[in-house]
């Protein structure tokens, strides 16, 4: 009985095949479910297809199909000589390509620009690869050594002194400036005012003279050491040696001295040894490479220098201001807020004008700063103010329990900020920071206002050449620069998405 009951539930023949399931993937299903799923989606699909047809097809025809690819002058890009509607005039780009990249940089020295680009790419690429080894050494070379090498490669020239000479000269210049301003104000107080205003002006003049005397007193040891170093046969190497000794001792004391070991001292001495090796290899003690004035720089060179310097320099400025705005010390908080609101309240064009034409009026008479360097400083401060608010948003997203837990483990405030709070805050605001970087890269075109020819400025200058004056030259040039800007900005955007996904992998599990 039991065997008969069991056999009634066991199939005696092979089951027939089932019908295949309805496909849920593929082009046809995508079109049916995403593009034609409703009357409204059908209308949107038709309108989008028409817009793509009206924009992409003419663009492809202009850039590729109807384009002219070879020629020696403007006649190659005229419809009368070609016999059909003329698209992009690529011979114009070929003829002006070196000008777009180097500006007016001397032809015989352009290898220095190529070498700088090559070194920058060689040091930057390993930083962008997560599994590349020696990240610390690579970052130190890129952020510390490469700017030093790039400056002397691009500009040329040598070194006549080092840290001690620089600090002593700067202190002397500011001391003389305050003294001169105070003496002039004190001398002319009686001629421009009378009574109480004259006494106040005279008092201000005496205060300025006193500030100058105080600066001179503080800098007197450096000035004496500078004069002592100048007595050596090679003042540069003597200055480097004294600077290495003084800075290394200072680093040793700041990092805890004998209590925390000798690592800081060794790193400082190794850094100065590397600087000495660079000076020797590049011949900076012998005058270095021929000087190339920054007014001859232009094209993509200026665009990359301004954008990369602005991006790299604005990050520490933004982090310092963001932390300062959240500080419990009123003076630091008020200064940070004032700085951020001031720089965010003025347009970048105003900053460039101030840095180029007004900043020299506030500097001592014998102290000058190159025009491009002034622009770089202004852009770094301007971008730093915007980055500060982005980073502050990330800091506010950190739960209070994070620093409290770090404090319970015995970490100091600075270690908590550097190791726990700031890394998490930067991870939260990657999209905002990259958005600021992309905007800064595109805003470099504004340097044309102060007579610095970046890529777009060099392009506009090339339109004045009558040898390439055709109806399509203007559109070809803007298309070429637009492609460059799009490629760089798109690459930054995609890499930021990669970094964001990698750092936030724990949220996707």
Image (tube, rainbow, N blue to C red):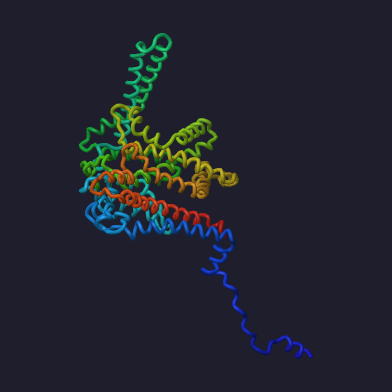
On the image, the x and y values in percent for residue 202 come to 38, 14
- Count of numbered labels shown in the rendering: 0
Q: Residue furthest top?
A: 195
Please indicate, yes or no, whether residue 273 appears anywhere in the rendered image: no
Q: Nearer the viewer, residue 1 or 166?
A: 1
The quarter of the picture where residue 315 lies is: top left
x and y, in percent, of residue 168 in the image: 31, 31
Q: Is residue 303 above or below residue 88?
A: above
- The C terminus lies in quadrant: bottom right
| Residue 17 visible in this rendered orientation of the protein | yes
Q: Is residue 193 left or right of residue 157?
A: right
Name the image quarter holding the N terminus. Answer: bottom right
Q: Position of residue 134 (x, y in %)?
A: 39, 55
Q: Would residue 185 be found to the left or right of residue 432 on screen?
A: left
The residue under the point 51% across, 47% down is 429
Q: In the rendered view, does 106 fall on the left or right side of 480? A: left
Q: Nearer the viewer, residue 161 or 348?
A: 348
The residue at the point 31 percent across, 36 percent down is 371
Position of residue 24 relative to residue 252, above or below, is below
Residue 482 drawn at (x, y percent): 37, 51
Q: Nearer the viewer, residue 450 or 81?
A: 81
């Amino acid at each position: 009985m039991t065997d008969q009951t069991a056999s009634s539930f066991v199939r005696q023949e092979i089951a027939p095949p089932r019908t295949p399931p309805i496909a849920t993937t593929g082009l046809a299903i995508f079109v049916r479910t995403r593009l034609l799923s409703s009357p409204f989606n059908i209308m949107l699909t038709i309108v989008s297809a028409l817009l793509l047809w009206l924009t992409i097809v003419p663009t492809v025809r202009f850039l590729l199909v109807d384009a002219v690819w070879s020629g020696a002058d403007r006649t190659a890009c005229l419809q009368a000589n070609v016999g059909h509607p003329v698209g992009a005039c690529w011979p114009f780009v070929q003829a002006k390509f070196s000008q777009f990249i180097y500006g007016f940089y001397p032809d015989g020295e352009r290898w220095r620009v190529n070498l700088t680009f090559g070194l920058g790419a060689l040091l930057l690429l390993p930083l962008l690869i997560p599994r590349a080894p020696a990240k610390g050494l690579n970052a130190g070379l890129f952020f510390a050594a490469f700017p030093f090498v790039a400056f002397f490669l691009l500009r040329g020239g040598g070194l006549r002194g080092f840290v001690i000479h620089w600090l002593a000269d700067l202190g002397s210049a500011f001391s003389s400036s305050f003294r001169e301003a105070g003496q002039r104000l004190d001398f002319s107080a009686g001629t421009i005012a009378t009574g109480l205003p004259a006494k106040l002006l005279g008092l201000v003049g005496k205060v300025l003279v006193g500030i100058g005397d105080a600066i001179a007193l503080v800098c007197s040891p450096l000035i004496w050491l500078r004069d002592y170093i100048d007595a050596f046969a090679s003042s540069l190497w003597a200055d480097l040696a004294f600077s290495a000794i003084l800075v290394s001792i200072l680093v040793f004391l700041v990092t805890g001295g004998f209590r925390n070991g000798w690592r800081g001292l060794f790193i400082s001495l190794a850094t100065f040894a590397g600087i000495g090796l660079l000076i020797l290899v590049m011949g900076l003690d012998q005058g270095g490479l021929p000087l190339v004035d920054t007014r001859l720089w232009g094209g993509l060179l200026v665009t990359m220098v301004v954008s990369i310097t602005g991006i790299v320099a604005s990050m520490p400025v933004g982090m310092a201001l963001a932390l300062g705005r959240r500080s419990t010390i009123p003076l630091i908080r008020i200064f940070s807020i004032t700085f951020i609101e001031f720089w965010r309240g003025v347009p970048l064009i105003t900053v460039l004008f101030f840095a180029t034409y007004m900043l020299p009026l506030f500097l001592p008479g014998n102290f000058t700063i190159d025009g491009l360097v002034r622009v770089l400083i202004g852009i770094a401060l301007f971008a730093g103010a915007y980055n500060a608010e982005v980073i502050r948003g990330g800091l506010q997203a950190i739960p209070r329990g994070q620093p409290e837990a770090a404090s319970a483990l015995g970490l100091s405030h600075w270690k908590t900020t550097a190791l726990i709070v700031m890394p998490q805050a930067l991870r939260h605001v990657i999209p905002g920071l990259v958005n600021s970087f992309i905007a800064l890269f595109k805003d470099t075109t504004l340097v044309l206002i102060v007579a610095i020819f970046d890529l777009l400025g060099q392009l506009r200058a090339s339109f004045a050449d009558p040898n390439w004056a055709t109806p399509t030259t203007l559109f070809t040039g803007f298309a070429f620069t637009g492609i460059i800007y799009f490629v760089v900005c798109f690459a930054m955007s995609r890499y930021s998405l990669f970094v964001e996904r990698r750092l936030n992998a724990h949220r996707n599990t």
